[in-house]
């Protein structure tokens, strides 16, 4: 009897273990299927672009004087600056928007790398800088600066060290709109991919926002900027 009871108990235990392993295998299979399904993803990028007008301009008004006598050169610079300031203020530029840089003096005779005979010893660069949010007004003044020529003041143009620059400083005001546009653009691309693959678009797995870039629209209108951002989003795909 005891031997028979032990045999029955062992059989029952064996069956229970087998059933337990079977159930465990089913659960593991379901889990693996779930993980496999969740790993079906699509990565898309959404682009948003917007043209804006610069809201800050920095305009260096550059003149040069040459000669052999520094006091007379400085006297000429003072006269030139007076005429430039009068021109700016008459046309609506305020004192707060104007700064006068110290003259930069180049002594050509003291330049040991200059072996050429030069007619003048000193070459002095004078810069009056306009920094303003009145971009349109400054642009009109740049076009009108030839009026200074009538007073014998030659404005130096084309010097790479003194380029007029335009900036857009109000990026935060357009960020939410552009991020929403980039996200919408990405979702449209993801929906198209899901449709073409006979799937349904699921939840977002990961999302990352690229850096905003601000560049000139073209070389002819540097005061018009192109703002750009790209968002990268990973979506789950469902059957």
Image (tube, rainbow, N blue to C red):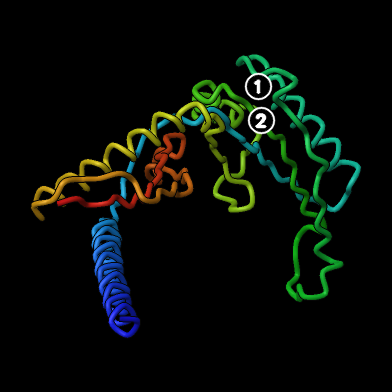
Q: Position of residue 202 (x, y in %)?
A: 25, 45
Relative to 131, is 3 on the left or the right? Answer: left
Residue topped by disc 1: 88
Q: Earlier in the sequence, mark 1 or mark 2?
A: 1
SS of the residue under disc 2: strand
**Residue 56, quarter of the rendered image:** top right
Q: Residue at x 27, y 77 (%)?
A: 8
Instruction: Pick whichever, 64 or 162, lies toward us.
Output: 162
Residue topped by disc 2: 130
Q: Position of residue 161 (x, y in %)?
A: 64, 52
CA–CA distance in space, label 1 to label 2: 9 Å
SS of the residue under disc 1: helix
Looking at the picture, does residue 226 appear above or below residue 7? above
**Residue 11, quarter of the rendered image:** bottom left
Front position among marks 1 and 2: 2
Relative to 170, is 41 on the left or the right? Answer: left
Relative to 41, is 60 on the left or the right? Answer: right
Q: Residue at x 84, y 66 (%)?
A: 109
Q: Which class describes the residues within 10 Å of circle 2: few (<14), some (14-19), or many (20+)? A: many
Q: Residue at x 27, y 51 (%)?
A: 236
Disc 1 and disc 2 in contact, CB within 8 angstroms: yes
Q: Residue at x 72, y 35 (%)?
A: 128
């Amino acid at each position: 009897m005891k031997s028979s009871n032990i045999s029955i108990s062992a059989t029952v235990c064996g069956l229970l273990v087998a059933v337990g392993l079977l159930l465990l295998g089913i659960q593991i299979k379901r889990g693996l299927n779930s993980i496999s399904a969740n790993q079906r993803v699509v990565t898309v990028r959404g682009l948003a672009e917007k043209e804006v007008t610069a809201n800050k301009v920095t305009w260096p008004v550059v003149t040069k004087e040459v000669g052999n006598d520094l006091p007379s050169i400085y006297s000429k610079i003072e006269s030139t600056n007076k005429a430039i300031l009068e021109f700016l203020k008459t046309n609506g530029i305020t004192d707060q928007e104007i700064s006068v840089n110290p003259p930069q003096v180049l002594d050509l005779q003291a330049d040991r790398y200059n072996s050429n005979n030069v007619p003048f010893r000193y070459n002095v660069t004078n810069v009056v800088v306009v920094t303003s949010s009145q971009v349109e007004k400054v642009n009109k003044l740049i076009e009108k600066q030839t009026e200074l020529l009538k007073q014998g003041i030659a404005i130096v143009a084309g010097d790479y060290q003194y380029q007029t620059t335009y900036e857009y400083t109000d990026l935060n005001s357009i960020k939410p709109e552009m991020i929403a546009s980039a996200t919408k653009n990405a979702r449209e691309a993801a929906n198209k991919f899901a449709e073409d693959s006979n799937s349904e678009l699921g939840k977002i797995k990961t999302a990352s926002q690229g850096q905003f870039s601000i560049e000139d629209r073209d070389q002819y209108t540097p005061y018009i900027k192109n703002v750009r951002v790209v968002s990268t989003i990973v979506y789950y795909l469902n059957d």
